Amino acid sequence: MMTLLKYDFRRNWNTLLAGLAVLIIVQIGLALFFSEVTGSVIGVIAYVGAGVAIYVKMIKTYRSNIRSFNRRLVPVTGLSHVLSPIIFGTLCWLGLMVVAAIHYFIYSTTHTGINFTSYINDSGIHVSEILNVLLFLWWVAMFSIIIIFLSISIGGSFRFKTGPWISIVAFFVLVNVISWLENIIFSGRFNSNELFHFTEESTALSFTSNRITWSDGTWASIIFEIIVAVILVGVAVYLNNKKVEV
């Protein structure tokens, strides 16, 4: 798997560096030419956009891994073709978070007179809770992309030109079936309102934690999704080895 992961990074290295350069230039431009609030909001949107771009790159990398003849010649197991893009995206997201943390540190040290609490009330939010939310969001993204990977493999199993459309249909079918099963077993999916409580006021946005991020229902739902994810990965590996046409 490490061989394929190194290959993925070498292939996408120039794109990653170009994206990082664009992100830095955008953030510098926002700091120089926009107001504090406007620059902060657009800056956050830029980071979110970079995260979405990494997500799309993971999908394209997976498709290349299973459809490219040269990639299939790499001496790795079928499971590596599924895990390599996931690890690739996770490492890229961690790098993006490090860049965002450095950006925040530089901004906070150079703008000592700025008080963000005048705009956002973050009472009750602790570092451990932020890490819990990030971990939860990471799992949501990973579970979703495993469904996308299997959908791509299902579409690639057909020789018809309608393969991409079959992938789209397979994705919606899988999402609805899994959601239906989860709703039956757990009487409704996890509610994001259990994570945080938002209250908009005339002068600020109140942002408080309910401190029940990892409730029993949440753990049960995640364990169920882990079991489903293992099954989906197994099916994807089988299709990639036996059915997907190069």
Image: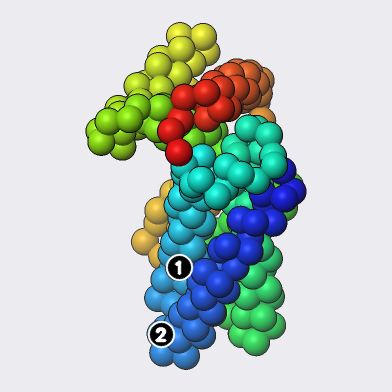
In the displayed structure, 18 sits above or below 75; it is: below
Q: Amino acid at mark 2?
A: Phe
| Residue under the point 45% across and 86% down | 29
Dot 1 lies on which element?
Answer: helix
Residue 21 horizontal/vertical position (percent) = 54, 79
- Dot 2 corresponds to which residue? 34
Q: Amino acid at mark 1?
A: Ala
| Residue under the point 40% across and 76% down | 38
Assign the C terminus to one quadrant of the image: top left
Residue 159 horizontal/vertical position (percent) = 33, 30
- Dot 1 corresponds to which residue? 46
Image position of 34 (left or right of 69): left
In the displayed structure, 143 sits above or below 112; it is: above
In the displayed structure, 199 sits above or below 191; it is: below
Closer-to-camera residue (71/218) = 71
User: Which color scheme is applied?
Assistant: rainbow
Are there few (<14), some (14-19), or many (20+) residues within 10 Å of tag 2? few
